[in-house]
Amino acid sequence: MGSGTTAIAALKLRRHFIGFEISKEYFILANKRIKKVKGQKRLDQFF
C-alpha cells in the first residue's frame, strides 16, 4: 500500500480500492492521507 497514493487516486476517480501493508509506519501514513482526502466534500478540491 505504501503511502496510499494509488488509493487516493482511486478515491479521486470515485473507484474502490483494496490495500495491504506490512509496515506499521506506512499504514499510519496512508491512513492519514486517505482520511484527509475522504474529508474533502467537493470534487473540485481534488484537482
Image (cartoon, rainbow, N blue to C red):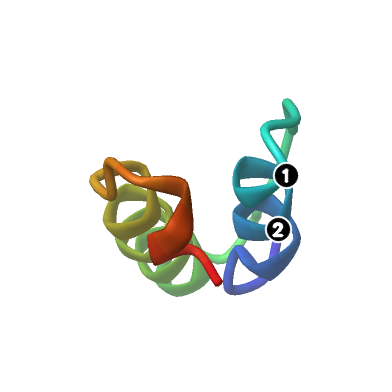
Q: Which mark is residue 9?
A: 2
The image quarter containing residue 47 is bottom right
Task: Please report the residue visible at 35 percent of the width from the left and 42 percent of the height from the top.
Answer: 38
How many circles with numbers are drawn on the protein? 2
Task: Please report the residue visible at 39 percent of the width from the left and 71 percent of the height from the top.
Answer: 29
Depth check: give the residue in front, 42 or 37. Answer: 42
Depth check: give the residue in front, 28 or 4. Answer: 4
Q: At which x and y percent is residue 44?
A: 45, 59
Q: At which x and y percent is residue 41?
A: 27, 41
Disc 2 residue type?
Answer: Ala
Above/below status of 35 relative to 9: above
Disc 1 residue type?
Answer: Leu
Determine crowd level at label 2: few under 14, some 14-19, many 20+ residues with C-alpha closer than 10 A: some
Q: Which residue is mark 1?
A: 13
Q: Which mark is residue 40?
A: none
The image quarter containing residue 14 is top right
Depth check: give the residue in front, 14 or 22. Answer: 14
Q: At which x and y percent is residue 1?
A: 71, 58
Q: At which x and y percent is residue 5?
A: 66, 69
Confirm or deny contact between disc 1 and disc 2 (CB under 8 A).
yes
At mark 1, the secondary structure is: loop
The image quarter containing residue 2 is bottom right
Task: Please report the residue visible at 28 percent of the width from the left and 50 percent of the height from the top.
Answer: 40
At mark 2, the secondary structure is: helix
Above/below status of 46 relative to 41: below
